[in-house]
Amino acid sequence: MSRVPGLRRILPWSAAMLVLGAVGGLAWLWLADPAEWEVTARGIILTEEAARGQFAVVVTFIIVGAALSVGWGLVAGRALRELGWVLVPVFAAAAGLAGVIAWRLGAALGPSDPRETGNPSLGDRLPAQLDIDAVAPFLVWPMFALIGLLLAAWLDRSDEDADDLTADAA
Protein backbone atom coordinates (compact mmCIF):
# COMPACT_ATOMS: atom_id res chain seq x y z
CA MET A 1 0.00 0.00 0.00
CA SER A 2 2.93 2.35 0.52
CA ARG A 3 3.98 2.14 -3.16
CA VAL A 4 1.31 4.57 -4.29
CA PRO A 5 1.80 7.94 -2.61
CA GLY A 6 -1.25 9.14 -0.73
CA LEU A 7 -3.28 5.95 -1.31
CA ARG A 8 -4.75 6.17 2.18
CA ARG A 9 -6.00 9.66 1.37
CA ILE A 10 -7.25 8.78 -2.11
CA LEU A 11 -9.40 5.82 -1.03
CA PRO A 12 -11.90 7.74 1.15
CA TRP A 13 -12.36 10.36 -1.56
CA SER A 14 -12.89 7.63 -4.16
CA ALA A 15 -15.40 5.92 -1.87
CA ALA A 16 -17.18 9.25 -1.49
CA MET A 17 -17.54 9.45 -5.28
CA LEU A 18 -19.04 5.96 -5.35
CA VAL A 19 -21.55 7.05 -2.72
CA LEU A 20 -22.30 10.07 -4.89
CA GLY A 21 -22.93 7.61 -7.71
CA ALA A 22 -25.67 6.01 -5.60
CA VAL A 23 -27.03 9.45 -4.74
CA GLY A 24 -26.92 10.31 -8.44
CA GLY A 25 -28.88 7.17 -9.28
CA LEU A 26 -31.57 8.15 -6.80
CA ALA A 27 -31.60 11.74 -8.10
CA TRP A 28 -31.88 10.46 -11.67
CA LEU A 29 -34.76 8.22 -10.66
CA TRP A 30 -36.50 11.14 -8.96
CA LEU A 31 -35.88 13.75 -11.67
CA ALA A 32 -36.29 11.65 -14.80
CA ASP A 33 -39.60 11.69 -16.59
CA PRO A 34 -39.52 8.50 -18.67
CA ALA A 35 -41.39 8.02 -21.91
CA GLU A 36 -44.77 6.35 -21.71
CA TRP A 37 -45.77 3.41 -23.83
CA GLU A 38 -49.43 3.33 -24.82
CA VAL A 39 -51.49 0.16 -24.96
CA THR A 40 -53.49 0.07 -28.21
CA ALA A 41 -55.34 -2.59 -30.17
CA ARG A 42 -52.11 -3.04 -32.18
CA GLY A 43 -50.06 -3.66 -29.04
CA ILE A 44 -47.84 -1.53 -26.83
CA ILE A 45 -46.47 1.40 -28.84
CA LEU A 46 -44.25 4.38 -28.19
CA THR A 47 -45.54 7.50 -29.89
CA GLU A 48 -43.13 10.00 -31.41
CA GLU A 49 -44.01 12.54 -28.74
CA ALA A 50 -43.37 10.01 -26.00
CA ALA A 51 -40.04 9.05 -27.58
CA ARG A 52 -38.73 12.48 -26.54
CA GLY A 53 -39.14 11.29 -22.96
CA GLN A 54 -36.40 8.71 -23.54
CA PHE A 55 -34.05 11.46 -24.69
CA ALA A 56 -34.98 13.50 -21.60
CA VAL A 57 -34.06 10.54 -19.38
CA VAL A 58 -30.57 10.49 -20.90
CA VAL A 59 -30.20 14.26 -20.58
CA THR A 60 -31.21 14.06 -16.91
CA PHE A 61 -28.56 11.36 -16.34
CA ILE A 62 -25.95 13.59 -17.98
CA ILE A 63 -26.91 16.68 -15.95
CA VAL A 64 -26.90 14.77 -12.65
CA GLY A 65 -23.55 13.20 -13.50
CA ALA A 66 -21.97 16.46 -14.59
CA ALA A 67 -23.08 18.32 -11.46
CA LEU A 68 -21.99 15.63 -8.99
CA SER A 69 -18.72 14.92 -10.78
CA VAL A 70 -17.54 18.50 -11.19
CA GLY A 71 -18.40 19.26 -7.56
CA TRP A 72 -16.59 16.18 -6.29
CA GLY A 73 -13.63 16.79 -8.61
CA LEU A 74 -13.26 20.36 -7.38
CA VAL A 75 -13.46 19.53 -3.67
CA ALA A 76 -11.38 16.33 -3.84
CA GLY A 77 -8.87 18.03 -6.14
CA ARG A 78 -8.33 20.82 -3.64
CA ALA A 79 -7.99 18.37 -0.74
CA LEU A 80 -5.56 16.08 -2.59
CA ARG A 81 -3.69 18.68 -4.62
CA GLU A 82 -0.19 17.66 -3.50
CA LEU A 83 -0.60 14.19 -5.07
CA GLY A 84 -0.33 15.63 -8.58
CA TRP A 85 -0.86 13.63 -11.77
CA VAL A 86 -1.83 10.44 -9.91
CA LEU A 87 -5.23 12.02 -9.39
CA VAL A 88 -6.09 12.04 -13.10
CA PRO A 89 -6.58 8.27 -13.60
CA VAL A 90 -8.03 7.87 -10.10
CA PHE A 91 -10.62 10.59 -10.67
CA ALA A 92 -11.53 9.22 -14.10
CA ALA A 93 -11.94 5.68 -12.77
CA ALA A 94 -13.90 6.68 -9.65
CA ALA A 95 -16.28 8.93 -11.57
CA GLY A 96 -16.74 6.35 -14.33
CA LEU A 97 -17.61 3.68 -11.79
CA ALA A 98 -19.96 6.12 -10.03
CA GLY A 99 -21.78 6.63 -13.34
CA VAL A 100 -22.26 2.89 -13.70
CA ILE A 101 -23.56 2.67 -10.12
CA ALA A 102 -26.02 5.50 -10.80
CA TRP A 103 -27.26 3.82 -13.96
CA ARG A 104 -27.68 0.38 -12.38
CA LEU A 105 -29.41 1.78 -9.29
CA GLY A 106 -31.78 3.98 -11.29
CA ALA A 107 -32.62 1.13 -13.67
CA ALA A 108 -33.14 -1.35 -10.81
CA LEU A 109 -35.41 0.93 -8.77
CA GLY A 110 -37.19 2.56 -11.71
CA PRO A 111 -40.10 1.30 -13.79
CA SER A 112 -39.87 -2.20 -15.21
CA ASP A 113 -39.96 -3.03 -18.90
CA PRO A 114 -43.49 -2.30 -20.22
CA ARG A 115 -43.45 -5.56 -22.18
CA GLU A 116 -43.22 -7.45 -18.87
CA THR A 117 -46.45 -5.92 -17.56
CA GLY A 118 -49.09 -8.58 -16.89
CA ASN A 119 -52.40 -7.66 -18.55
CA PRO A 120 -52.52 -3.98 -19.47
CA SER A 121 -55.85 -2.57 -20.59
CA LEU A 122 -56.43 -0.61 -23.79
CA GLY A 123 -55.46 3.01 -23.27
CA ASP A 124 -53.10 2.31 -20.36
CA ARG A 125 -49.89 4.29 -20.32
CA LEU A 126 -46.86 2.36 -19.07
CA PRO A 127 -43.66 4.20 -18.12
CA ALA A 128 -40.54 3.10 -19.97
CA GLN A 129 -37.56 1.71 -18.16
CA LEU A 130 -34.85 4.15 -17.14
CA ASP A 131 -32.10 3.21 -19.54
CA ILE A 132 -28.99 4.61 -21.13
CA ASP A 133 -28.46 3.18 -24.60
CA ALA A 134 -25.14 4.80 -25.50
CA VAL A 135 -21.63 5.10 -24.09
CA ALA A 136 -21.31 8.90 -24.29
CA PRO A 137 -23.51 9.69 -21.23
CA PHE A 138 -21.22 7.51 -19.11
CA LEU A 139 -18.17 9.46 -20.30
CA VAL A 140 -19.66 12.68 -18.95
CA TRP A 141 -19.06 11.52 -15.36
CA PRO A 142 -15.23 11.15 -15.63
CA MET A 143 -14.95 14.11 -17.99
CA PHE A 144 -16.60 16.47 -15.51
CA ALA A 145 -14.64 15.01 -12.58
CA LEU A 146 -11.49 15.94 -14.51
CA ILE A 147 -12.91 19.41 -15.23
CA GLY A 148 -13.42 19.76 -11.45
CA LEU A 149 -9.82 18.67 -10.90
CA LEU A 150 -8.66 21.20 -13.50
CA LEU A 151 -10.64 23.95 -11.75
CA ALA A 152 -9.09 22.93 -8.42
CA ALA A 153 -5.60 23.15 -9.93
CA TRP A 154 -6.42 26.53 -11.45
CA LEU A 155 -7.77 27.84 -8.12
CA ASP A 156 -4.69 26.55 -6.31
CA ARG A 157 -2.48 28.28 -8.85
CA SER A 158 -4.46 31.51 -8.39
CA ASP A 159 -3.98 31.24 -4.61
CA GLU A 160 -0.22 30.73 -5.08
CA ASP A 161 -0.04 33.72 -7.47
CA ALA A 162 -1.88 35.89 -4.92
CA ASP A 163 0.56 34.79 -2.20
CA ASP A 164 3.51 35.60 -4.47
CA LEU A 165 2.09 39.07 -5.17
CA THR A 166 1.58 39.69 -1.47
CA ALA A 167 5.14 38.57 -0.71
CA ASP A 168 6.54 40.80 -3.47
CA ALA A 169 4.62 43.82 -2.17
CA ALA A 170 6.04 43.39 1.35
Image (cartoon, helix red, strand yellow):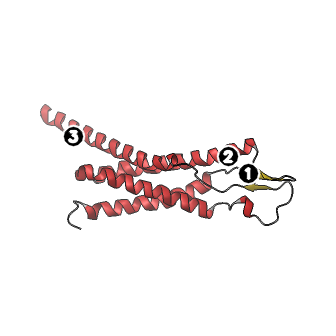
Task: Find residue 18 and report its horizontal and vertical position in percent.
Answer: 43, 61
Q: Upstream in the sequence, badge 1 or badge 2?
A: 1
Residue contact at pointers 2 and 3, CB within 8 angstroms = no
Residue 51: % across, % down: 70, 45
Label 3 crowd (10 A; few <14 / some 14-19 / many >=20): few
Q: Residue at x 73, y 45 (%)?
A: 50
Q: Position of residue 20 (x, y in %)?
A: 46, 58
- From the viewer's perspective, is residue 33 above or below residue 118? above
Query: Is disc 1 placed on a helix, strand or loop?
Result: strand
Q: Which mark is residue 36?
A: 1
Residue 67 appears anywhere in the view: no
| Cα separation between marks 3 and 1 | 53 Å
Q: Quadrant of the C terminus?
A: top left
The kind of secondary structure element at disc 3 is helix
* Residue sitting nearer the eye, 33 or 55: 55
Q: What's the amino acid at mark 1?
A: Glu
On-image quarter of the N terminus: bottom left
- SS class, disc 2: helix
Q: CA distance from mark 2 to mark 3?
A: 47 Å
Residue 53 disc label: 2
Query: Is there a contact, CB below 8 Å, between mark 1 and mark 2?
Result: yes
Q: What amino acid type is highlighted by mark number 2?
A: Gly
Q: Does residue 70 appear in this view?
A: yes
